[in-house]
Image (cartoon, helix red, strand yellow):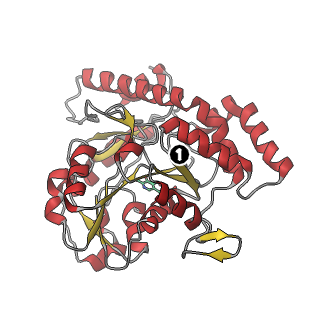
Amino acid sequence: MSEMKVDFANLQHQYQLYKDDIDARIEAVLNKSNYIMGTEVAELERELEKFTGAKYAITCSNGTDALILALMAMDIQSGDEVITTPFTFISTAESIACLKAKPVFVDIDPKTYNINPALIEAAITEKTKAIMPVSLYGQPADMDEINAIAQKHNLKVIIDGAQSFGATYKGQSEVHHGDFYTTSFFPAKPLGCYGDGGAVFTNNDEYAEKLKMLRVHGQNKRYHHKYIGIGGRLDTIQAAVLLAKLPRYADEVAARQNGAAIYDEQLANSNSASGFVLPYIKEDRTSVYAQYTLRVQGREQLQAQLKEVGVPTAVHYPMPLHLQECFAYLGLREGCFPESEKAAGEVMSLPMNAFLDAEQVNYVASQV
Ligand SMILES: Cc1ncc(COP(=O)(O)O)c(C=O)c1O
């Protein structure tokens, strides 16, 4: 097979395909100059509600603020504890720490890389207020087990779905399996805008009303502030981009899943003795493959070799959160969460997007 150059996220290709609609949507905003909370924002929220079946979709500035808004809506205070995974992007635990609450880490299931529900109860104290699972790489966590623990201990559940918008758990959107589901529209996410963006989903009337105020400085009436909030709105132009992309999103998810199936087949069939481990998706849920992530031995060398033949790779994530400098105050050390630490040393993501053709996927697999 001759050498080809494979794009990791293919954002330029996607823009060229959808250009007419995206440009028209953006131009409409420019012509109206309704840059803050223009009609497109509400229109997008109704479309996101239809897409997920959520009672409320509340858009916001990014996926990190979505988590902060959800924590603020449930009144997380200084000293409260929130249980989460250390094998995730920084935002998950950062959002908890931003509110002066304590992230309490629980190790992962080494097969799915998601929080291991069997370890959660041992981490619960009288200060625990919530559990924050992450749907890593686009696959929902073990929500039934997590919700059973939450119910038993009277805890709230916030799903960090920054990587999983469009995934299903037992045939339904994840928004129906937690008190809050949050997502990110960062450009490289499965559904991305052209800057920063995010959303919080809930089926709870009171939370929805509070979230809408919190994202506009806690305001219930112009210049009247019921709560301490944040400046957390989604820009109208970003809403316009998402409105152009959302109608194609189900097809894009199918294309990502198709690409992953080809990777699975090609890599499983290869006679390689390199001993890599393929993604493991549980039968009762779907992944949107925000990343297609393998476990490999000799990762750095393999990455360098792949780079030479035009195949970009990435590591999500090389250092678990309990070992990050910013969390040194938690007093955790190497050895505390062995599965997360092992995964951080072995995982490697291959190019994944909705526009990889079979030839490209086969090429990448053959090079791996
Ligand atoms: C698991 C996870 N949580 C939260 C975020 C934060 O999203 P954003 O970058 O939109 O703030 C991201 C993505 O960057 C993420 O991958």
Q: Residue at x 27, y 76 (%)?
A: 330
Residue density around tag 1, few if under 14, some if 14–19, many if 20 or more, within 10 Å: some
Left or right, 296 with respect to 182, comes to left
Kindly indicate the quadrant of the structure image that contains residue 103: bottom left
Could you say where residue 298 lies in the image, as x and y percent from the top left? 26, 45
- Can residue 264 be seen in this snapshot? yes
Is 82 above or below relative to 141? below
Q: Residue at x 52, y 64 (%)?
A: 210
Q: Residue at x 59, y 29 (%)?
A: 248
Could you say where residue 303 lies in the image, as x and y percent from the top left? 37, 43
Nearer to me, 202 or 87: 202
Nearer to me, 149 or 299: 149
* Secondary structure of the residue carrying numbered label 1: loop
Q: Residue at x 54, y 60 (%)?
A: 209
Quadrant housing the N terminus: top left
Residue with the mark numbered 1: 188
**Amino acid under label 1?**
Ala
Direction front: furthest residue: 205
- Ligand 1 within 8 angstroms of badge 1 C-beta: no
Could you say where residue 74 lies in the image, as x and y percent from the top left? 41, 66
- Can residue 335 be seen in this snapshot? no
Could you say where residue 119 lies in the image, as x and y percent from the top left? 15, 56
Nearer to me, 271 or 105: 105
Nearer to me, 164 or 343: 164
Q: How many marks?
A: 1
Left or right, 286 with respect to 38, comes to left
Direction right: furthest residue: 31
Is 273 above or below relative to 34? above
Left or right, 251 with respect to 320, comes to right
Quadrant housing the C terminus: top left
